[in-house]
Amino acid sequence: MEKLLAVAKTIIPSPMLELCWLAQRRNAINFAEGFPDFSAPSPIKKSAVSAINSDFNQYRTQHFPCNDIAICCGQTEAFESAIFATIDPGDEVILFDPSYETYDGCITLAGGSSKGQRAVLVALDPPHWSLDPQKLITSCTSKTKAMAVNSPQNPTGKVFTRAELEIIAKVRCTSDLLAITDEVYEHLTFDAEKHISLASLPGMQKRTIITSSLSKTYSWRIGSAIAASHFASAITNFHIRITDSAPAPFKEAALTALRCPSEHYETLRADYKSKRDYMLKLLGGLGFQIEHKPQGSFF
């Protein structure tokens, strides 16, 4: 007898995984998934090995002096826990379209909806994926609870400008909305582009939950959610129920990563920028018209 939850029947397999399987079967290059093509730096791996050899195999306490951070198993779990901690059934959550497909699935699982549909989509205007303020304003209703912002963005490579972020902040403050950001690509910006965290704008720190991970910068899957203590505490509670804890050796390695010199990010940016420029030249030579040069991330 089938006893699946109704919402479980609406969650489709990840398109990224399907493309990954297709690429493997065809021995093709996979552009679908956002994973680095480099190994984790040696000091990080050595730190994990040392932790294992030192028998750091017990639960690592979540009770530490900084009470506005929740440590998770990756950005996706941090985002999902943030959604579960804040979204009630029927609440509306705004996504900027196109967006990372996992966001919509998390919102659906939490019961977030709009007129029976899933997340509320605010389309960004091509070719540069600009934000139209009027589209955002008219998408807000009395049921709107939150917006999710990813910058630099997957899949467009867009970096939201300060002016665009100020518009988002103004709408959120006016409508008393929550912001859930995905900032995993914050160190991967190119040319003159700079990452600006929405939480850094006036009035936004207490309204913003920042989710991130070390996977894109260090090839190490440890994530976090940074927010006001009542949000961080609730996210930690969901994290504990979902996975209990991130592996202790991974946490020790993550600490080593965060202590690495900042030159690592400069090398990373230069490497990805050269790959971006190579691909733009290659595609241009094949006759593709590239109207939007990615400003960040590796998409």
Image (tube, grey):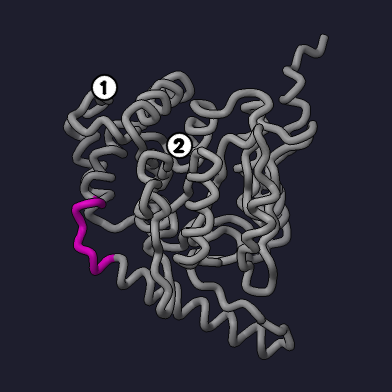
* Residue 208, image x, y percentages: 42, 42
138 and 243: which is toward the camera: 138
Q: Which residue is drawn at 69% across and 40% down?
A: 119
Q: Give the range drawn in magenta.
A: 257-264
Residue for badge 2: 78
Looking at the rendered image, the quarter that the C terminus falls into is bottom right
Which residue is disc 1 drawn over? 58
Q: Which mark is drawn over residue 103? A: none
Identity of the amino acid at label 2? Ala
- The three-letter amino acid code for the residue at tag 1 is Gln
Determine the residue positioned at 73% across, 37% down: 118
Residues at marks 2 and 1, CA–CA distance in whole angstroms = 21 Å
The relative height of residue 251 versus residue 286 in the rendered view (above or below) is above
Res. 21 in view: no
Q: Which of marks 2 and 1 is in front?
A: 2
Residue 164 spot, x, y in % from top left: 52, 63
Image-based side of 199 in relation to 149, left or right:
left
**Which residue lies most toward the front here?**
174
Label 1 sits on a secondary structure element that is: loop
Left or right relative to 276: residue 7: right
21 part of magenta stretch: no
Local packing at callout 2 (Cα closer than 10 Å; few below 14, some 14-19, many 20+) is many
Residue 276: x and y in percent read: 52, 77
Residue at the extreme right:
1
Question: Which residue appears at 39% of the width and 61% of the height?
Answer: 196
Q: Which of 77 and 231 is in front in this view?
A: 231
